[in-house]
Image (spheres, rainbow, N blue to C red):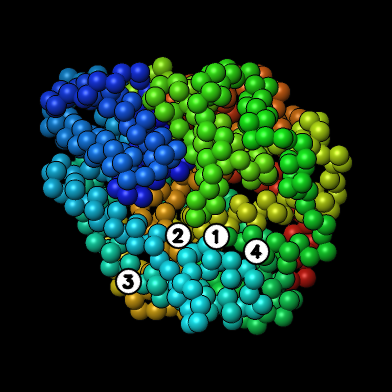
């Protein structure tokens, strides 16, 4: 099992990890393992209980369930930390290739490398948990008003009448984040030391091992993807900057053509959704399911059946009856909005979701994504425990992505959710809306990965965090800070990345999602942006075969099963957006695109 989409425990201990698939419920053995298979068995037995504990924190949050989940999670940390340390001390000269592969995979089944020393392990967990908690609890207190959390700050920014007011909130938030720079810096050395104990040069080398590459090889592959994407992103960037200028926003472009972050209207420099109306000026609104979904469906269960039926058209096995019996279809909300989670609770085949009873377009998309993930869990459920995970971090995202891309207007009209197909300029509006939600995130994540690599390799010291963060953002994403502070920590605007999570999983996942669509639709009678894999049982069989491999083979083998290619390429993404690229080039024909 992989962690629930919302894992409340992760915020407490900072060590969320994938769990196992087994029906066993016995307590794990106390002795250290002599082989990877023995550690697998211990973790499988333990993680069956962990899945139940996690589910309780989601569906019955409270002091007791958090205490229980913390205890079970801490025991898991002891098992895997002690177990891997024991395996690394063992004589591995006579191990079979599959045991050596399992050892590599087992070292990727935690959120962080775990120190062998229990006290060091506990200290690292506290450091990470404290840092994450402080970021999550950040608030901006303004004069004569209440203190604002991040959601409230971004809401104020979206309603602001001009860039100066947005900048007020942005700089105020950065002031609150600045003290977290030293807290984050304290995690760098112990994370690198833990990675070193597990046989890696540093933390980013451990991250790269999840892609079965070293860090230099991963960086080279990422740069190749960036170079593929840059001409299209550059055209989008140029158009947005020109529209900002045309809207008489002073300083919309800097001398080098970058866009100041203060103009984006959000704290996250990857989030350009607020620029949609400006970028799409004179275009019709893209089609929306906001009204069609509640008009069509009477319950969230009915909406879930609709999403599950999509995967049935691919020939996937049906979700087990227990999914419908044990899922919680009215999980309510918390302070961040609708509460959603997906989990393989019994760590074998008891897959469930928890979702609020909101019959709307957001839950429509989320259900397709969540059920895609559960199908991945079920597909590799019978493999050895170490192999029960995607072959690299982007594959799970890619499987969900190709499903969402396949919810095309043609597919939705055939099922009665749309009355008319968008065409011409309406299609351009749809593609522009998707591109604004997709491309800036990819380029921002690539910039964040560059910064992360620099920090954990020792090239960037704490005093230079802000300087090097914005240097990466300018180079890879064309976004400029316009102002720096000596003690700044703008990386915490992306808390999941500043906390050490892998920014490249989403990049590879998005690109691979389009690549899967391109492979399925080769030779189709419609353009790629209108093509859907729905109903294609031949491709569905290939796709499910890819899922069923889990991590038992290297990821190029899995990719080849579904696409026929062993290389990651953005060519399908560029083909998908070809009509938008042509429109952007027409808009930019008389403009000077400096970045």
Residue 302 percent location from the top left of the image: 67, 30
Residue 101, relative to residue 161: is it above or below?
above
Residue 342 percent location from the top left of the image: 49, 35
The disc, 2 or 3, on the residue closer to the chain's N-terminal end is 3
Query: Going by the image, does 270 lie left or right of 490?
Result: right
Q: Which residue is nearer to you in this view: 298 or 10?
A: 298
The disc, 1 or 2, on the residue closer to the chain's N-terminal end is 1
Q: Which residue is mark 1?
A: 270
The disc, 3 or 1, on the residue closer to the chain's N-terminal end is 3
Q: Which mark is residue 494?
A: 2
**Residue shown at the point (59%, 66%) measured from the top left:** 155
Query: Looking at the image, do the residues carrying marks 1 and 2 touch, with CB atoms under 8 Å apart?
Result: yes
Q: Which residue is mark 4?
A: 274
The secondary element bearing badge 1 is classed as loop
The secondary element bearing badge 3 is classed as loop
Q: Which mark is residue 179?
A: 3
The secondary element bearing badge 4 is classed as helix
Q: CA distance from mark 2 to mark 3?
A: 15 Å
Query: Going by the image, does 483 lie left or right of 592?
Result: left
The secondary element bearing badge 2 is classed as loop
Name the mark nearer the viewer: 2 or 3: 3
The disc, 4 or 2, on the residue closer to the chain's N-terminal end is 4
Q: Residues within 10 Å of mark 2 (few under 14, many from 20)?
A: some
Name the mark nearer the viewer: 3 or 1: 3
Q: CA distance from mark 4 to mark 1?
A: 11 Å
Q: CA distance from mark 3 to mark 1?
A: 23 Å
Residue 55 percent location from the top left of the image: 41, 34
């Amino acid at each position: 099992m992989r962690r629930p989409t919302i894992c409340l425990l992760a915020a407490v201990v900072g060590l969320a990890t994938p769990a196992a698939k087994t029906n066993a419920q016995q307590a794990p053995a106390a002795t250290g393992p002599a082989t990877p298979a023995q550690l697998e068995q211990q973790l499988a037995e333990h993680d069956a209980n962990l899945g139940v504990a996690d589910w309780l924190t989601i569906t019955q949050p409270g002091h007791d369930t958090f205490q229980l989940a913390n205890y079970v999670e801490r025991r898991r940390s002891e098992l895997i930390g002690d177990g891997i340390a024991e395996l690394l001390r063992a004589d591995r000269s006579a191990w079979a290739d599959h045991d050596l592969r399992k050892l590599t995979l087992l070292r990727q089944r935690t959120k962080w490398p775990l120190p062998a020393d229990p006290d060091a392990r506990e200290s690292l967990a506290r450091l990470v948990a404290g840092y994450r908690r402080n970021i999550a609890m950040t608030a901006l207190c303004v004069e004569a008003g209440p203190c604002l959390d991040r959601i409230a700050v971004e809401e104020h920014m979206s309603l602001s009448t001009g860039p100066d007011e947005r900048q007020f909130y942005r700089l105020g938030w950065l002031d609150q984040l600045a003290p977290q720079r030293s807290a984050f810096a304290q995690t760098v050395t112990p994370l690198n030391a833990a990675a070193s104990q597990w046989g890696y040069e540093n933390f980013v080398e451990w991250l790269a091992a999840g892609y079965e590459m070293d860090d230099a090889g991963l960086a080279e592959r990422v740069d190749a993807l960036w170079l593929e994407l840059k001409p299209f992103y550059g055209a989008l960037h140029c158009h947005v900057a020109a529209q900002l200028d045309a809207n008489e926003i002073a300083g919309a472009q800097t001398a080098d053509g970058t866009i100041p972050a203060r103009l984006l209207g959000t704290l996250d420099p990857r989030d350009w959704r607020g620029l949609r109306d400006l970028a799409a000026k004179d275009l019709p609104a893209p089609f929306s399911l906001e009204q069609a979904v509640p008009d069509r469906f009477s319950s969230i269960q009915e909406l879930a059946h609709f999403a599950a039926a999509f995967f049935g058209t691919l020939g996937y096995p049906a979700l087990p009856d227990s999914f419908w019996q044990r899922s919680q279809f009215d999980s309510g909300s918390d302070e961040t909005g609708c509460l959603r989670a997906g989990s393989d609770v019994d760590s074998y085949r008891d897959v469930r979701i928890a979702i609020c009873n909101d019959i709307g377009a957001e839950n429509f998309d989320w259900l397709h994504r969540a059920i895609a993930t559960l199908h991945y869990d079920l597909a590799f459920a019978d493999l050895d425990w170490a192999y029960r995970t995607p072959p690299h971090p982007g594959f799970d995202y890619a499987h969900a992505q190709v499903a969402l891309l396949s919810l095309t207007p043609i597919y939705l009209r055939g099922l009665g959710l749309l009355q008319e197909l968008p065409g011409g300029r309406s299609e351009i509006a749809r593609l522009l809306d998707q591109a604004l939600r997709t491309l800036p995130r990819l380029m921002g994540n690539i910039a964040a990965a560059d910064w992360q690599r620099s920090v954990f390799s020792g090239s960037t010291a704490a005093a230079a965090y802000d300087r090097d963060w914005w240097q990466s953002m300018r180079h890879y994403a064309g976004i400029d800070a316009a102002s720096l502070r000596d003690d700044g920590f703008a990386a915490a605007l992306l808390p999941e990345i500043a906390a050490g999570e892998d920014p490249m999983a989403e990049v590879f996942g998005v690109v691979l999602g389009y690549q899967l669509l391109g492979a399925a639709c080769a030779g189709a009678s419609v353009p790629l942006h209108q093509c859907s894999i729905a109903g294609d049982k031949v491709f569905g069989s290939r796709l499910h075969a890819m899922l069923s491999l889990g991590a038992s083979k290297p990821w190029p083998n899995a990719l080849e099963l579904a696409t026929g290619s062993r290389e990651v390429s953005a060519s399908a993404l560029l083909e998908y957006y070809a009509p938008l690229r042509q429109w952007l080039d027409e808009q930019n024909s008389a403009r000077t695109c400096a970045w």
